[in-house]
Image (spheres, rainbow, N blue to C red):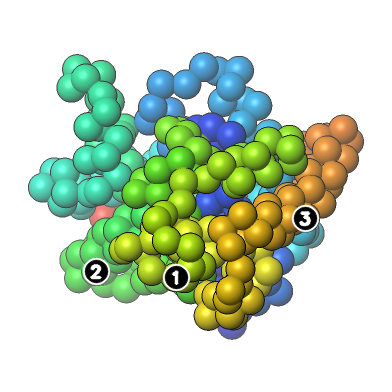
Amino acid sequence: MKEKILTGIKPTGSLQLGNYIAVLKNLKALQDRGECYIFIADLHALTLPIEPEVLRQNSIDIAAFYLACGLDPDKSTLFLQSSVSAHAEANAIFQNYLYMGELSRMTQFKDKSAKMKESAIGLGLFAYPVLMAGDIVLYDADIVPVGDDQKQHVELTRDLVNRFNNRYGEVLKMPKPEINKVGKRIMSLSDPTVKMSKSDPKGDIFLKDDLKVIRKKIMSAVTDLGCEVKYDPENKPGISNLLVIYASMKDISIEEAEAHFVGKRYGEFKGEVADAVCDVIGKLQERYQHIIETKAYEEALKKGAIKANKVASETLKRIKKAVGLLTLE
Ligand code: ATP
Ligand code: MG
């Protein structure tokens, strides 16, 4: 049996380099390894205020970038979360099996809500991991590739699966988060103590940035005192972040990246990081542009929705039966 792999990105903003490294870059390898369900978490994007037109455009962009990274709609299932109503139904059921205490301990909720007025914090932002648990279990996912920041949510899904299966028997498949060795958390270039984030951009590299802009952002990235290019996240967070980015673009280890820059100055180092990023992103942008022009994402999303609905509705039936909801055939 092939492994089932599920991963998604929410269309809250323009895709940034961290999204590329966590998800997009690995798509081809994942697709060769298992049965992939790759989605656009558009319902999740509604957890923060967003203009309808922006949400639509961001969703198209994510689909186009997935395809530009080599996602083959004949091999993988590419879909919009909102095209599969089982996600909302699973959410309605699972919200009774995750608890207020555990949801309020989620770092993402704490980080995102801290920047908002209490009266503006929606229930959806609080209950985000409930919807996400449904996303994962509906496809019997074994593996969930994510960045470091989403690990806690996948762990909560594991708690839910344990709780649910203890109560009802082996109904849900136990998923496992999978995190890149290199690049599990890409930090902002202007403040290397915070992660790059598309909904709160601070010194981010966007996949749609002009290459000249990318180069400028890298050349003016915050670095540290001293002049040695060394991986030391605690004392040299800026340099370490750039080293991780370089290693990730070149598909090499941090040690190999460090060895490459021995004796080189910061300026030269940054120039090579910029070359590496522009090389990868430049090629990606060309493919993205072609997909946008041909609207190839439309057919892919329609086809994916049919397959995803079929799989998710079968699992949903299993879940409904388990809890005692009548499933009349
Ligand atoms: P938002 O600000 O809306 O939360 P985001 O940039 O964090 O946006 P998500 O849609 O939340 O993106 O996450 C998509 C995937 O990208 C997840 O697997 C997440 O862990 C990963 N990811 C996001 N930011 C980074 C980052 N800075 N470094 C590595 N992975 C990241
Ligand atoms: Mg995020």
Identify which residue is drawn at 68% across, 44% down: 215
Secondary structure type for disc 2: helix
Q: Residues within 10 Å of mark 2 (few under 14, many from 20)?
A: some
Secondary structure type for disc 1: loop
Q: Name the residue tied to disc 1.
A: 231
Identify which residue is drawn at 37% across, 30% down: 47
Which is more foreground, mark 2 or mark 3? Answer: 3
In this rendering, position of residue 147 left or right of residue 103: right
User: Three-letter amino acid code at disc 3?
Assistant: Asp
User: Three-letter amino acid code at disc 2?
Assistant: Asn
- Where residue 180 sits in the image (x, y, percent)? 50, 69
In the depicted structure, whether residue 115 falls above or below residue 88: above
Identify which residue is drawn at 25% across, 32% down: 113
In the depicted structure, whether residue 68 falls above or below residue 165: above
Which is more foreground, mark 3 or mark 1? Answer: 1
Q: Is mark 2 within 8 Å of ligand 1?
A: no
